[in-house]
Image: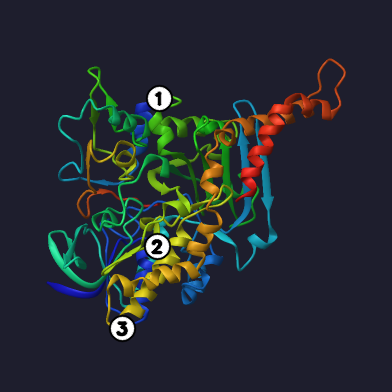
Amino acid sequence: MEKFEVIIIGAGLAGLSAAYTLAQNGTEAVVVERGDYPGAKNVTGGRLYLNPVKKYLPDLWPALLEEKALERPVAVELLMMMAPETSTTLRFRSAEFAAPPYHSFTVLRGVLDRWLAKKAEEKGAMLVVKNHVDDLIRENGRVVGVVAGGEELGAETVIAGDGVLSLIAEKAGLRAPGLPQDYAVGFKEVIELPSRVIEDRFALGENEGAANLFLGSPTHGCFGGGFLYTNRSSISLGMVLRIRDLADARPLREAPQFLDDFKSRPEIAPLIAGGETVEYSAHVLPEAGYGGLIRPFADGLLIAGDAAGFALNAGLTVRGMEFAVASGVLAAQAFKQAREKKDFSASSLSVYQRLLEESFVRQDLKTFEQAPHFLDNPRLFDHYPKLVGDILRDLFYIGERPKQKYFSNVKGKVGWAEAWSILKDLRAGLKI
Amino acid sequence: MTEKSNLKTKLGKNVFKPVKEPHIRIRPGFEKDPRLRAAVYACPAGLYTLNSEGAVQLEIDGCLECGTCRIACGTEVLEWNYPGGGTGVQFRFG
């Protein structure tokens, strides 16, 4: 059996970040990817926050921007609360976010993953595409390799970056199949539009980007929301819905219908008018946060990225890719330490967990431990967007009869029982 | 345009490479299992349909390999695998 120091399963951001770091340290690393090319099976909303990952891939930094591996720097953050008849928008623009060194970028994985793979290969990592890892090879309970496309490949350590379902972590006994309350599905269309049209429609400067989140009636009370990210010459428009809510079929709707209705909203339709849909993709996201984390190491095995549950929905920010990059790099560092001791047992590789605990990966997940609980509140996805719209409607409205005082309008919508409920929800919100 | 044909048009924009054999199957005897209904609503590619006899059918062409059905229905009713290397959907944008 052919043998390598490290076999990495999956050419996503976790696997490729691990491969890059390992190759840089002179470790013989091979990435096995089931798609035709890196990124072929990967999907993001999406956007990458730069600050968290800077120190993990320091020397890739300038090239990432210069070689156009990312789409547009996000200068505008937009949050829209939608009710059937109204919508209320909070639009935030930051000169700091719009200028170098930039805060976050919109991303297309078909571009970013291929770029990162090329960088890892330049460092000496090997990439095998069109090859699916079917199983782990174990000897005395230790992982010693993988079976890929019927062939056996040996390794000192296997790093599984095989994504949110991580069938590999399941085979290793580190996790059980996911449950519908702990996962959401995101699905989106990539809609091509000329750069100038995008800038005009979103009131952006040249090459500036916007990140838009939509809360309320598009999800019909389900946990989730809509999103829209501006790329260089396309728009990523989609929705995220918790799988449990879809599966319960309350309301009785099929997933694709949510997106079609969202697209036809008067707030959205003009933004994409004349654009051509060039791809329709879907991907599952971990939503359980800190409570959903697994033990990410075993004898001869490390788990990184979505596969280990490293993703965080904190309401205003939804993150996964930074966690994938950082955990991939930390898995490589853990291997390096284990190699110095020539010991790839679970206890030796457990240094990975310590590195994760010292990093933002586990710290941010811990800080926002209560976020899934707070977000699991149907009032957020239905009631509040409508309440805000109703109050504003009354404040703006001039009728035939003499106008009431502003406060009387608000009091009419927010009685004692409602005020009490708002306080309770706010209290839950203060914990995150 | 009807909902289904709209969805077919969207899926038609994707690059798919033929899958040798279906990578997801309804386990024999479970076609009428109520757990399968979840996939009818949750599958973003609309590949699961409920027929007039109350059985759920799966049309694998157009699968986005997201795994929603595996999570929604569970592995007792679905035999779920990724398609072989170099087959299935190949996202160009992602």
Locate residue A372 relative to residue A78 in the image: left or right: left
In percent of width and height, residue A336 lies at 35, 79
Q: Which residue is at the front of the view, A206 or A69?
A: A69
Query: Do callouts 3 and 2 point to residues on the same chain?
Result: yes
Vertically, is A390 above or below A355?
above
- Say which element carries label 2: helix
Q: CA distance from mark 2 to mark 1?
A: 38 Å
Specify the amino acid type for callout 3: Lys
- Say which element carries label 3: helix
Count residues near mark 3 (Cα–Cα under 10 Å), then give few for <14, some for 14-19, many for 20+: few
Residue under the image location 78 percent in, 27 percent down = A411
In percent of width and height, residue A62 lies at 52, 73
* Residue at which label 1 appears: B1
Specify the amino acid type for callout 2: Leu
Q: Which residue is at the front of the view, A42 or A134?
A: A134
Vertically, is B63 above or below A210?
above
In percent of width and height, residue A384 lies at 64, 33
* Residue at which label 3 appears: A341
Q: Which residue is at the front of the view, A298 or B22?
A: A298
Query: Do callouts 2 and 1 point to residues on the same chain?
Result: no
Residue A373 visible in the picture: yes
Residue under the image location 40 percent in, 24 percent down = B1
Residue A184 visible in the picture: no
Q: Quadrant of residue A129?
A: bottom left
Specify the amino acid type for callout 1: Met
Tell me which numbered mark, 3 or 2, is placed earlier along the sequence. Answer: 2
* Chain holding disc 1: B
The label number, if any, that marks residue A13 in the structure image: 2
